[in-house]
Amino acid sequence: MNTKELIVEKIKEKFGESVEEVSDFRDDLCITIKKDQIVNLGKYLKEDPDLQFIMCKDVTAIDWATRKKRFTTVYHIYSFKLNYALRLKSNIDDNPPTIETVSFVWQSANWYERETWDMYGIKFINHPDLRRMYMPEGFEYHPLRKDFPVLGIPGSLPLPFKAE
Amino acid sequence: MDRIQQIYNDEKLLKKLQEDQNLTIEDVLENEMVINMGPQHPATHGVLRLVLRLDGETVVGIVPELGYLHRGYEKMAENMSHIEFIPHTDRLDYTGTMCNNVGYVLAVEKLAGIEAPKRAQYIRMIVSELSRIAAHMVAIGTFAMDVGAVTMVMWTFREREKVNSIFDRIAGARFTTSYTRIGGVASDIDDQAFAEIKQFLAELEPALVEMDKLLLSNRIFIQRLEGIGILPKEDAIALGVTGPNLRASGVEYDVRRAKPYLFYNEIDFKIPTFSQGDCLARYFQRGDEVRESIKILYQCLDKIPQGEVIANNPKKVLSHKTEIYSKMEELIHDFMIINFGINPPIGDTYLSVENPKGELGFYIVSNGSGQPWKLKIHSPSFCNLQAVSQLCKGAMVSDVVAIIGSLDPVMGEADK
Amino acid sequence: MGLEAVLQKDGFLTTTIDAIVAWSRKSSVWPMPMGISCCAIEMIAAADPKYDIARFGSEVMRFSPRQSDLMIVAGTVTYKMAQVVRRIYDQMPEPKWVIAMGACTSSGGMYRSYSVVQGIDQFLPVDVYTAGCPPRPENLLNALMTIQDKIGKTKARDFQNRSLAELEHSQN
């Protein structure tokens, strides 16, 4: 049994009903799971002795703009034991977008989730320190949402005064 | 502010302050002090801002604040074609530009299903290893400068200038190169450039020995770094630290070995690791990686095959200028690629490469159109910076400078 | 060569105060390296042994704004950073000059995006714009020479009892 089959089988055995989709595009294994199971799945993948996905490389989101479930959060995790990178996804809807934080499972997710909150406005429930990562405090918008223009909203960011 | 207000409200304290103009030692030490470091500070390598809470000279807490160089790359990428984004990748980690070019192009090629010719892949390996040397030269030089050895930055920049002049010959730009193309590289390397690379490598090895001599015979340098900012293995993994900093903590993880891209599986090289995980280990780590890069470069120069440098795939890959000017088909394809993009299939891929700073990943989501629907840059400096608050806790103020220097963040990449 | 060759005996020299002040000012411009992004590396390269900015008397890079005359803004200025740049500029003593190094500092360059200021002249008086992304070190040295020419033409009284607003007007 190769690595991919092992991972899929193990997850399906444990989270059979919550797994929404298993895709394998260009040799990247990706598992979509219901949003209320993401922390449990993370814990399981991290602690299972055969899998040991102990490193979280990235947390981000996708804004689909027109879909009913507008956002998808994406997690890239890595196992040193299997030498394998796995992608997890979770679809969430937009009223308002919330999902449980995984920063208690993987410590490194702390900043990635802050970045995702800054860029997409997805609220991570129970996050220890959910502040903006890049944009200044007091900025009202979330730049990577598809309805935010590239050139920004005039007047939303102040410039220092220039004496004339 | 609250504390000052408190003092004014407290009659006893106010009276004492008005009577006794001379503060005693106890008064000063009792109070914790919050100081601001950066964003314009010589030791923060750019525009990183740190807010430190100090007890005497010991750091009690530290909060890094990023975003002073947030240029909105990911938003811009969604509004331009895949090819247009190549020049932007130069400016991510601006010390090792070629590595970023190679990483991005490989990610797009994986998504679109294009394979570059073998010679192009070897050229990519050569330029990214050269770039790695250049980046580590900046890292070592500025790191040594931060802890007081200003000579080093002159010496390392002397070596770096040689890499820049090689790039000038290969790519036509000494610094922001934009050399790679989707499906290959922009131009072939000529013999003169090969000769220059060989000469550079021959000169680099004695120079590295000299640098080590200069620094390691200096007791101040050793004592300021040894045992400072220790990052244990487990913490390094939990905090998502990558690259040389992870390997200096004893984790033998290198993307070139774990998931080989290009032709790194044909090359014989070691992954240097250190178990101490302190600032000195991170210095040694970078030096050893430069030595491994030299080995890789010599092997690449031996093994590089003859042939084309760009794939023959007219619907996805831009043809050469002479063909576009002389053939109708190529002109049409060129027009289509430039105006409508290369239209990769619907799907999403993640590809990471080993950069001088660590693992640089590109997560590209395509909806079948010529522009990426989403492009996420997983930047190594951002991950490494997350360790700052843990490393600096309990250290002295002067150690903060050494720790940041040893982590070697580049803000262009961390802030995106 | 130099003065020693001309003045073989006890001699004297007639000049104006303005000329000698401007000459000494322009020959030792102390830059404040406002290194923000990529251009900062080229700015360090201009100080390295190959390009050697010391030939122009400007090797004394001072990271403290209080000790410098010339601010080299090297790199993309975002809205968040603009506040900082302006504050550092205000801390520099008069007279002071500004080089906008590189395309993104001068005009926003390739960054047409929500967070990048499209040209620092929106909040700073700029004396010399330098083209290139990033400019080669030679180009930065050229900008420095242009600044030196400009300083050479100033008179000491230009800077006396002038308000900040007037100064900015005259320097633009």
Image: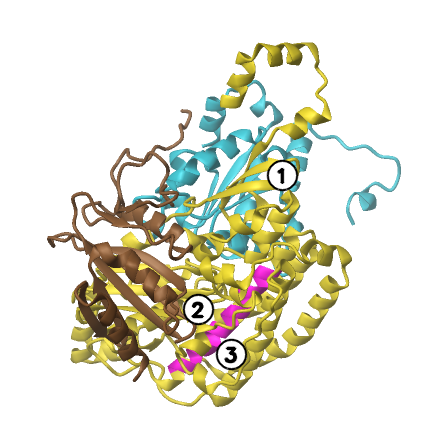
Q: Quadrant of residue B106?
A: bottom left
What amino acid is found at the position of numbered circle 1 in the picture?
Lys
Packing grade of label 2 (10 A; few <14, some 14-19, many >=20) is: many
User: Badge 3 is on which residue?
Assistant: B193
Label 1–label 3 contact, CB within 8 A: no
Compared across the picture, whether B237 is left or right of C92 comes to left
Find chain C in the image and tell me its colour.
cyan
Above-or-below relation of B271 to C82: below
Compared across the picture, whether C85 is left or right of B60 comes to left
What amino acid is found at the position of numbered circle 3 in the picture?
Ala
The yellow-coloured chain is labelled B
Residue that appears at 55% across and 57% down: B407
Task: Give the Cα separation between the discs numbered 3 and 2.
Answer: 19 Å
- Label 3: element kind: helix
Q: The disc numbered 2 marks a residue on which chain? A: B
User: Badge 1 is on which residue?
Assistant: C26
**Magenta: predominant secondary structure element?**
helix
Residue that appears at 24% across and 67% down: A31
> Which mark sits nearer the N-terminus, 3 or 2?
2
User: Badge 2 is on which residue?
Assistant: B99
- Residue A126 percent location from the top left of the image: 33, 45
